Image: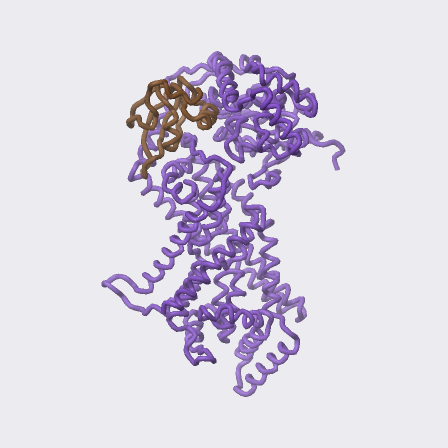
Chain colours: A brown, B purple
Amino acid sequence: MTAAGWKSGKPLANATIGSSGLVSHFTNERVAGKLLSMGVLPGTLVRMIRKAPFGGTCYIKADNILLALRKDEACSIVLR
Amino acid sequence: MHPNPPFRIAVIGNPNCGKTSIFNLLTGLQQRVGNFPGVTVDRKSGFLSHHAGFRVEVVDLPGAYSLYPTSKDERLVVQTIVNPQDPDYPDAVLYVADITRLEKHLLLFTQVKDAGFPMILALNMADTAAEEGLEIDTSALSQKLECPVLLVSGRSGLGIDALRLAILAQAQHHPANAPDGSAFFRFSPEEARIAAELQTGFASLNHYQRILLTHHAEWLPHLSSMQRERIFQLRERTGFRELPLQVRETMQRFDRFTPLVHQSIRNTREKVNSLTEKLDDLLTHQIFGPFFFFLLMALLFQSIFSWATYPMDWIEGGIGQLSHWIKSTLPAGWFNDLLSDGVLAGLAGVLVFVPQIALLFFLISILEEVGYMARAVFMFDRVMQVFGLNGRSVVALISGGACAIPAIMSTRTIANWKERLITILVTPFISCSARIPVYTVLIAFVVPEKTVLGIFQLQGLAFLGLYLLGILAALGAALIFRFLLKSSDSSFLMLELPPYRLPLFRNVWMTVWGKIKAFTLEAGKIILLISIALWALSSYGPAEKMKKASAEAAQIATEQNLSAQDAQTIEASLRMEASYAGHAGRLMEPLIRPLGFDWKIGIALITSFAAREVFVGTMATLYSISDADDALRVREGMARERNPRTGKKVYDTPTSWALLVFYVFAMQCMSTLAVVRRETLSWKWPVIQFLFMTGLAYLSAWAIQLAF
């Protein structure tokens, strides 16, 4: 969980719209703490639904909840 | 009164779990809305309704995802439940969870339970769950979670009576707090050691509460600096690393309770969440989304801007008549004047804002209830971030175009304090409806009534320009504050977009009512005081000068053979010149001379601090015009005015522009300052706001004089 750069996988922020994947790990502990509290865990299925009109903000679906994440927040979620 | 302190039950749950609906149903109209001590987060409390003999206080704590908070609201939950001396420290906890999201919502439940509180678990949205094909075995869940579990609906009221009985049963048994262990996670060696060491000094807390204390020692307000230092040293000695331990704890909890949820809830139908997602395809669409948002905002703006004027006119008319009645019925004298011109005028100044506040919060809380507000935040967060603002600031800035007061009150939903403060500070730059009369009177001095390019009214364009100037000032100031203000909170978005739901009007009315009460009772006091002071300033002066003014007026009246009304108008004008406000106007003349303003404008600047539109009324009095509603005559009176020193017209082009720009920027509204004081809990921010807004106004007006 801790700043592990050695694992491969791509950040959620780079996922194309409509694509989905399982969460592998997080690269930012602070963001991780909050995401875990909201129920986004390693192994959770996440899907990139759309990006905000003015760029940056992501609209994602994690299990059955819908979330808005800033780009840097979405960057710290690494998909398997 | 009651001999025993009430049994206190705190309502805790995740955001969007429907906690407030349940709270409203339990307490009915017997609730009080205030602040939690030291912060401007709404604290709602009330007593359990429909029962006799036993007093149960219900306190609604802010929504939170876990006991590892990331916002001020969430922190309140932690600081309440780890401090037995806290006035809101509960005897038991009513935990509300959305049954359709139970596998997410139980995290906080297990944490609060480990903090030792007797729990009641209310599974909300039971009606929706049935529609969605969820089958719940509450007795199995109750057995596993070791607390009563009830199915309820904040929408239909289902199960609320049973919930009330369960709470009363808790209150009668007064169950002891649970033991120290946790059924949901195993303490790490460091945690176990810390929990044992903190036995001394924190004996009244259980083990998990002591662990929470250790995690949050930096900011928990009730810790003394010695206690804090001791915990810091303990952390160092034991190698206690907060974030990894938090992650470890959270993962273990999910691992333990997720199977429990799966065992007791069966989903008989395939999950379809499609309505919300289909709506969002449109409502958060790249192009259509913002378009729809601005359409909604236009409606919102229109309603406070124009619909509110009807009840506002009734209020002003009603109070005007009352004041007239008092004037003619009570014996003349200072008390009569104080009552009719001071107190009633102040009261009008408070009540006149009520329709705007009611309408704005009616619409905003519908948008909030429906779930739309989160979408607006999603769409505008990026743009607003540039200016140090929040997605929600858009709503405040747009509402500010009607009136800054409800706009500033609406910023409570911005969780990040810095973003909220900046929104509060810059919103009054947006031209509000009270500036229109001032613009109308002054614009005619500088812009001819002409049509350009066939369709555009030149004066209309100037109007538009003034509005744009206000918007630019707001965004520019926000940008400056973004770099000036320090913030300890890290800024997150990570916002849950709740499923769209029909609004519950019970909740909407409660919000509107709470906001009106808060404004009239809290900000109202300050507004009333200032307006009495302003009244005293403009109707009293050094005795002999006032006497001389009256005598002079009587003389003019006899010489020119004026009617009684005209004589009165002249007397009012001369008395205002002789009053303390008049003196202050003359006293400040050297200060405002560089802007081209004379002492009469000085008087108007002082009196229109009550509200900007008072400018026109004061000008009418000063130029002896009996009917202040007649903007044309006020303008004529002003147009004739010449500077006795230079013989030039006072309202020449540069001065009129200077005055216009002054009114775009200056903080000429005591009611706004009173509301800022209420929303920031100190005089520091309204004073800073007054200084930078009026300072900018002064400098810009000066620059205009220099440029011409």
At 50% across and 18% down in the image, what residue appears? B248
Q: Can residue B238 be seen in this view?
A: yes
Q: Is residue B526 above or below residue B92?
A: below
| The N terminus of chain B: image quadrant | top right
Q: Position of residue B147 (x, y in %)?
A: 59, 17
Horizontal arrangement in the rendering, residue B346 relative to residue B696 (left or right): right
Q: Is residue B560 above or below residue B235?
A: below
Q: Is residue A33 above or below residue B598?
A: above
Q: In which quarter of the image is residue A77?
A: top left
Residue located farthest toward the left when viewing the structure as drawn: B454
Q: Position of residue B593 (x, y in %)?
A: 48, 71
Q: Position of residue B121 (x, y in %)?
A: 56, 22
Q: Quadrant of residue B555?
A: bottom right
Horizontal arrangement in the rendering, residue B296 relative to residue B202 (left or right): left
| The C terminus of chain B: image quadrant | bottom left
- Counting every numbered tag in the picture gives 0
At 65% across and 34% down in the image, what residue appears? B225
Residue located farthest toward the right when viewing the structure as drawn: B3
Q: Is residue B627 visible?
A: no
Q: Where is residue B65 in the image (x, y as percent from the top left)?
A: 50, 27
At 59% across and 15% down in the image, what residue appears? B182
